Image: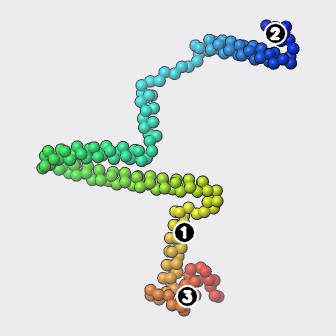
Amino acid sequence: GRPPPDLASPCSGRWQDWLDQQLESRKSKLESVELEMYRDVTHQPQITRRSRRLAKEREAETMSVFDRLYHVARERSKARKELEAVLAADPTPLRSPRARGQEHSRRRSADVYESLYAQGLELRARQAEQAELAKDPGASHQVLGRSREYYWQMLDRQIRDAFDKAAQGNQLAYTEMEDFLRYFGVMARAD
């Protein structure tokens, strides 16, 4: 409808408030009509028990490597204690070739878990190192610890190779120094 006569001036603040109220009421009416019209055609999914179970499994998969390994280690420890209890009850168990193969398989899988754990620790150390570098803006030009270690190993290998080519035995004589420097790549070859 029409605004009341005292709100007829477009400059008043009450005029703006009245307009806002009118727009809000029209918007809410439109939304309610839309909801009523589309109620029958809007898909409303039903979550099945299987979907809920899969969602829980996915949540369990989001555990960190350390949590998963800890969980596996606890299960293995529990199984080992049960096995020890069975062996304590019967001190002369029969061991078939199949049982020995299972034991070998257990040792091998334990090695895999230890390897995964070591990789996880290395990853955590690298991430911590990168986080430290990210905190310090001047550190972005620094060399990472692993790269530095690799560089020194490479340099050590080059020095050893040049020494082995130039030296006559375990010591480098002063007369062999020029050959060592050439092999190492510091000095140009005299043509």
Label 3 – label 2 distance at C-alpha: 103 Å
Q: Is residue 7 left or right of residue 86?
A: right
Residue 50 or residue 23, whichever sits in front: 23
| Crowdedness near tag 1: few (<14), some (14–19) or many (≥20) residues, C-alpha within 10 Å | few
How far apart in space, not on screen, are marks 1 and 3 (Cα)?
A: 24 Å
Between discs 2 and 1, the one toward the N terminus:
2
| Residue 71 visible to an observer of this rendering | yes
Q: Quadrant of the N terminus?
A: top right
Is residue 128 toward the left or the right of residue 4 in the image? left
Residue underneath mark 1: 151
Nearer to us: label 3 or label 2? 2
Q: Position of residue 130 (x, y in %)?
A: 55, 55
Task: Tell me the quarter of the picture where residue 89 sits.
Answer: top left
Q: Residue at x 22, y 43 (%)?
A: 82
Residue 52 location (% of width, % of height)? 44, 28
* The image quarter in which residue 39 lies: top right
